[in-house]
Image (spheres, helix red, strand yellow):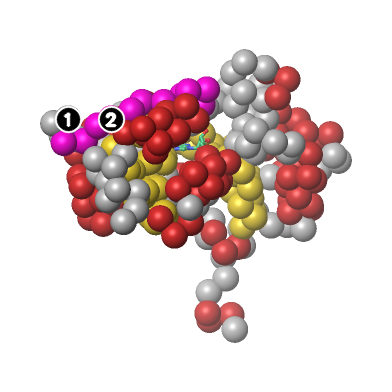
Amino acid sequence: MTKKLYVVGVGPGSKKYLTDYSIDIIKKSHFIIGYKYTLNTIKHLINRSYNQIFEVTMKSQDDVYLNVYNNLMNENDICTVPFTGDVNFSESEVVDRLLNLFGDRNVEIVPGISSIQIASAKSRVPLDKASIITFHVTGDIEEKKIDLVKSIVDKKSVILVPRPWPSNKLKNFMPSEISSFIKEKGVDTSKIDVWVFENLTNNEKETVYKGKLDSLADKNFSDLSVMVIDQNKRQTYLEF
Ligand SMILES: C[S@@+](CC[C@H](N)C(=O)[O-])C[C@H]1O[C@@H](n2cnc3c(N)ncnc32)[C@H](O)[C@@H]1O
């Protein structure tokens, strides 16, 4: 007898990337708690006479998780918290909180398709040949910035999620700041290829920018963007 939680990756921007497994879980959940954007991706699955929906923000989420867990859920009830893309990428600040609240053995983590994977597919930069970095964290990013420069100097590709911080622009680490930062560290950014993908898998809104890294210095991109620093060298099995 437990209160069961599924944390499920959905999207990143389209219902077409949902797995049958996550669809079944969402449909059978008594409670669904999520951010507006993420709930929107699964809105076609929601049956309001069965699923109780709670839309949260960063600020309100903790109160809602506690209320649902302590006051609303009965034993054997199922709750789902959907996350954009893959729940195992750049979501741990929230997932760790939910693991603490529900207890590890009552939680199943269901992977989804990450915006990073879609960016990898579109740029033809394989995940296994790139450094994967998220700057979309609340904590300190100074070490990650050093890792970023090190990867570039080592001639690796980098697939990264930037950091939008609407309430404090000084904490932004978006493509323009990233480009300037790498240049300040002595890298010749005029020679390095870069991609920026916005609104991936959202047909009407998806955009692709390709250029040299230095060209990003004066460009603005939306919060929903993924950047690929492309130093990929294609290498087939014929070379080995
Ligand atoms: C907290 S991170 C979550 C990443 C997510 N778990 C994933 O696997 O894609 C949020 C950031 O992911 C990126 N992102 C999520 N969905 C996206 C999409 N459809 N297109 C472009 N970037 C996206 C954006 O940079 C966004 O600010």
Q: Depth check: 180 or 161 in front?
A: 161
- Residue 56 at what x, y percent from top left? 41, 26
Q: Is residue 52 left or right of residue 233?
A: left
What residue sits right under mark 2 in the picture?
53
**Disc 2 to disc 1: CB gap under 8 Å:** yes
Q: What type is the residue that disc 2 sits on?
A: Ile
Alpha carbon distance from label 2 to label 1? 8 Å
The reply to whether residue 160 is visible in this rendering is yes
Q: Residue at x 39, y 38 (%)?
A: 69
Q: What type is the residue that disc 1 sits on?
A: Arg
Q: Quadrant of the C terminus?
A: bottom right
The reply to whether residue 91 is visible in this rendering is no
Q: Residue at x 53, y 60 (%)?
A: 126
- Residue 183 at what x, y percent from top left? 80, 36
Q: Depth check: 229 or 71 in front?
A: 71
- Point out the residue furthest to the bottom here: 240
Vertical placement of residue 231 versus 36, above or below: below
Residue range corresponding to the magenta coloring = 50-60
Label 1 CB less than 8 angstroms from ligand 1: no
- Label 2 sits on a secondary structure element that is strand
Q: Which label sits on residue 204?
A: none
Q: Quadrant of residue 178?
A: top right
- Residue 70 at what x, y percent from top left? 40, 36
What residue sits right under mark 1 in the picture?
48
Q: Quadrant of the N terminus?
A: bottom left
Vertical placement of residue 170 versus 15, above or below: above
> Which of pointers 2 and 1 lies earlier in the amino acid sequence?
1
Q: Residue at x 44, y 60 (%)?
A: 105
- Label 1 sits on a secondary structure element that is loop
- Residue 75 at what x, y percent from top left? 29, 48
Q: Does the stretch in magenta take in 53?
A: yes
Q: Does the stretch in magenta take in 6?
A: no
